[in-house]
Image (tube, helix red, strand yellow):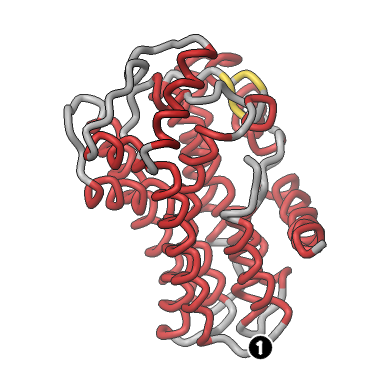
Amino acid sequence: MMLMMLIDEIKKRSSHVDAAINELLPVTHPEELYKASRYLVDAGGKRLRPAVLILAAEAVGSDLKSVLPAAVAVELVHNFTLIHDDIMDKDNIRRGMPAVHVKWGEAGAILAGDTLYSKAFEILSKVENDPVRILKCMDVLSKTCTEICEGQWLDMDFEKRDRVTELEYLEMVEKKTSVLYAAAAKIGALLGGASDEVAESLSEYGRLIGIGFQMYDDVLDMVAPEEVLGKVRGSDLMEGKYTLIVIEAFGKGVTLDIFGKGEATVEETEAAVRTLTECGSIDYVKNLAISYINQGKAKLDVLRDCPEKDLLLQIADYMIAREY
């Protein structure tokens, strides 16, 4: 029941974000470029990052409309990273549909991603707020984009290596995934008029739940049905990705025949998942994800009690309660 209420609250805010996207990122000349840029955005997605930004602003006393351009900017950055990730990872399916580079080619997809990236900053500049706070938000988002690139580079570098440590994995996940949640929460707080100290606590909330989110994502890749995932189950194993589940298992001396193999039968995948379950690696990562989520929730103690704070707490819980 609580989950349905949370989804309803996110959808309410998402409808405003979607309307703002239509206004701030119209399909204009050259149409195919903007169709390619809008393709993943229009395909849906959970809109969790803009929801975090809006709720952070509301929780410190602001309102949704005043931060809408910032929420759109964060969502566009997220989609920019997805387009480029799919090219680099050679993933042909995203959200159950052909990836952007499949429909428009790699060159077209790169341009679509670059368009979203540049438009995000143009749109963020349209926020009506104190210029000093807008400048701080620009600084946060630009540094975040750099960190995302650093995280993606680390992720690609891991694939060439025989060993990756847990600390290295955590650095990669923080930069590739969690910094955008941190940025969303901090930008929302700053634009909402919060002090630097409160904004920093909200940033930490985003960072910690973002790490938990990615860890749980790795768990779902192993245990969720393919029709729910929208991609091949165990694809991280076949691609040779050093998730924390794999790192922990390898540290115990476990061997996985399908790791880095590129493809595997259903039976081989089931056997690998069974091995990772029996050695305790999947539970280890699941429990660690829960720990990060709880640490993130504690950072919200700086906020007054209000419905928006409760929703931010529920979003944190949702990170480890979702099915995909």
Looking at this view, is 190 or 318 the one in front? 318
Q: How many marks?
A: 1
Residue 16 visible? The answer is no
User: Residue 258's quadrant in the figure?
Assistant: top left
Left or right relative to 186: residue 224? right
Identify the residue at the far left of this view: 162
On the image, the x and y values in percent for residue 184 come to 52, 62
On the image, the x and y values in percent for residue 96 come to 66, 25
Q: Is residue 53 above or below residue 148?
A: below
Q: Name which residue type carries label 1.
A: Asp
On the image, the x and y values in percent for residue 286 come to 47, 51
User: Residue 70's quadrant in the figure?
Assistant: bottom right
Residue plotted at (51% across, 36% down): 115
Residue plotted at (60% across, 73% down): 56
Q: Secondary structure at mark 1?
A: loop
Identify the residue at the far front of this view: 278
Left or right relative to 68: residue 277? left
Left or right relative to 250: residue 127? right
Residue plotted at (45% across, 47% down): 283
Quadrant where the N terminus sits is bottom right
Looking at this view, is 321 or 8 the one in front? 321
Residue 18 visible? The answer is yes
Q: Is residue 137 above or below residue 262?
A: below
Left or right relative to 73: residue 173? left
Looking at this view, is 57 or 65 the one in front? 57
Q: Which residue is mark 1?
A: 305
Looking at this view, is 52 or 133 the one in front? 52
Quadrant where the C terminus sits is top right
Q: Is residue 79 above or below residue 254?
A: below
Circle 1 Cα neighbour tier, 10 Å, few/some/many (<14 / 14–19 / ≥20): few
Residue plotted at (64% across, 29% down): 225
